[in-house]
Every structure is written in C-alpha cells, then in structure tokens.
Image: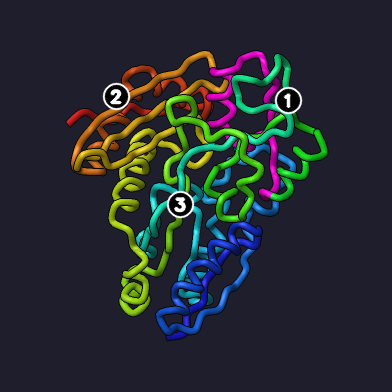
Amino acid sequence: MRLVIGSRGSQLALWQANHIAGRLHDRGHEVAIEIIHTTGDKILDLALAKVGAKGMFTKEIEEALFQDRIDLAVHSLKDLQTEIAPEFEIAAVPKREDPRDAFCSLNYASIERLPRSARVGTSSLRRQAQLRALRPEVQVHALRGNVDTRLRKLESEEYDAIILAAAGLRRLGRIDAIRQIIAIDLMCPAAGQGALAIEIRAGDDSVQQALTFLDDPASRSETDCERALLRKMGGGCQVPIGTNASWQGGKLHLQAVVTSPDGKAVLRESGTGESPIALGEAVGDKLLNKGGAAILEAVYGHATALPEQP
C-alpha cells in the first residue's frame, strides 16, 4: 500500500515522520513524506501564548488530509486540539517517550542551582508559570524556534538555561544537553507530552488497518485521560495547565496542576480510576472548582464557564 505522511518541516517533526515511515516500510508499505508549513511555524516573533490561533501547528496539515493530498498526519500529540473535527480521527498513539521536561544549561546542574536573576528561556506558558512558582526571582524569557535553534541560543550564552521536552531531545540524540530531568511533582508536563498521534480521515478503513499495529493501549489511555482533563478545563496547547497520567498497580493515576502566569497561585489535584475519560473529567472538575476557573479566566481574558454538575 502506498501511503503519504503529512508533517511539519522541523527537524523533530521530520524525525517523527521518518520514524513512523520506517515502521510502515518494515510492514511492506511504500511511504512518502510531504512537508507542510503551519501557522505556528510561520509566526516566530511572538510567544506561543500570544499567538492565540487554535490548531496553529495542525490546521494546514488537516486541510491536506481533508483534500486527500496525504493519507495520514504525524503530530506531537500535545499540539493536537482536544476537540478533533468529525472528519478526522486518531488512528494510533504509539508507545510514549518520557513525558517529563528537561533542564538544559552550560553552567548549572539543576533549577535549584540557578543563581538569582538567571535568564531562563522557554516557549511554554505552562513551563513559565511553574518555573516562576519554583524560582520567582529568576528572569523568564519567551524562547521560540526548533530544538537546534534553542540549543544554539543556550550555547551562545543568550540564556543561563532553557527548558525543553525530554522526549524531543532524546529523539534527536541530544541527551548530552540535559542536565536535569525535572520531576513531575516540580514541573507537571503538558497533556500528551512525549506521545505522537497519527491522524487519518474518519472512516478510512484501509489506512486504519495499516496503522493498527502502531497503537499502544497504555499510551493511548494515559493521553486520553490527560486530554479529557484539558478538554474539561477548556484548554488548548498554550495554557498554564500541567497533567500526567500513568498506570500504577492496574489503575490509572492522574496528577494535574494549574498555575497563574506569575506563579503565585498553584493549584494541584490528583485522582485514581480505571476509566481514562471519567478520571480526567473528575480531576478537571476539582481543579476548576478549587479556583482554576478564575486563573483560566484571567489567562483567556474572558469568562471560563464552570461545567454543569450532573
């Protein structure tokens, strides 16, 4: 079967697309990759939280999928909107990489070792907010660009440290840049971080069957739980919400945090269950009612409705 994969053009996105292409090729498929430039790739002079475009890293790829120019899209799951249009479906979530964040620095071994007024770069509002909660005296700066660009800015000493997803550094063979894997209790990851999502046209049975072997049930249920929480809280990929689900002793354990952008308010909740969606929604409800709704209202600049109670 001939399959065309749609992907962003960054080094990491192409690694991910080529990884999936290689696994499909091993199953006897003929595979090509089409590079598609997205809104998020074109706007590089603003912090992501200020861009405000829904689906900024996926919209153009989904358009190509809808127009039959490609057969499947390989996304970083954390970039994919929690509400997928009915024309599409997630055919597979392959086995997840490490979901945690990584601290990178030339001179300092950890967040705790940073001097006062150190310059730290990160593109993520979630990381910025949690970093301010941990180290309110450091200077936090927005950092855009692909992984290599960000590492070059660190190496040229524009920053004392930067924070990136550990998964991306591992996939690109840059674990040499990691000084500290940040514990989830200190910096809770983004929903879906470390996971890939393979998106197809809804009802495309032949492509779905070709991709079934890639789906990892544990990774899918963990990320379904995290995305259910994010959806319940009305969040996209640029919100100060961290969440991580993992299977422990046959049950799903979910941790979540919402942090005000200045880091002064940090709300945490957790829960255990067997149904990923129900658990995600229940913990999301708890966070909203605990004060998360007010934090998100301030971030969005408009009211975030509390969910109706059943």
Q: Quadrant of the C terminus?
A: top left
- The residues tagged by marks 1 and 3 sit, at their Cα atoms, a distance apart of 29 Å
Residue 300 position in % (x across, y down): 51, 30
Residue at 66%, 48% (x, y): give it.
147
Which of the two labelled residues, at mark 1 and mark 3, occupies the earlier sequence position? 3
Q: Secondary structure at mark 2?
A: helix
Count neighbours of disc 2 (C-alpha within 10 A) and say few if under 14, some if 14 to 19, many if 20 or more. Answer: some
Please determine whether, in this image, residue 101 is positioned above or below residue 212.
above
Please determine whether, in this image, residue 54 is positioned above or below residue 255.
below
- Occupied quadrant, residue 294: top left
Q: Is residue 40 left or right of residue 205?
A: right
Q: Secondary structure at mark 1?
A: strand
- Magenta residues span 119-147
- The residues tagged by marks 1 and 2 sit, at their Cα atoms, a distance apart of 34 Å
Residue at 67%, 21% (x, y): give it.
114
Count neighbours of disc 3 (C-alpha within 10 A) and say few if under 14, some if 14 to 19, many if 20 or more. Answer: many
Which residue does the numbered mark 1 point to in the structure image?
119
Q: Amino acid at mark 2?
A: Lys
Which residue does the numbered mark 3 point to in the structure image?
77
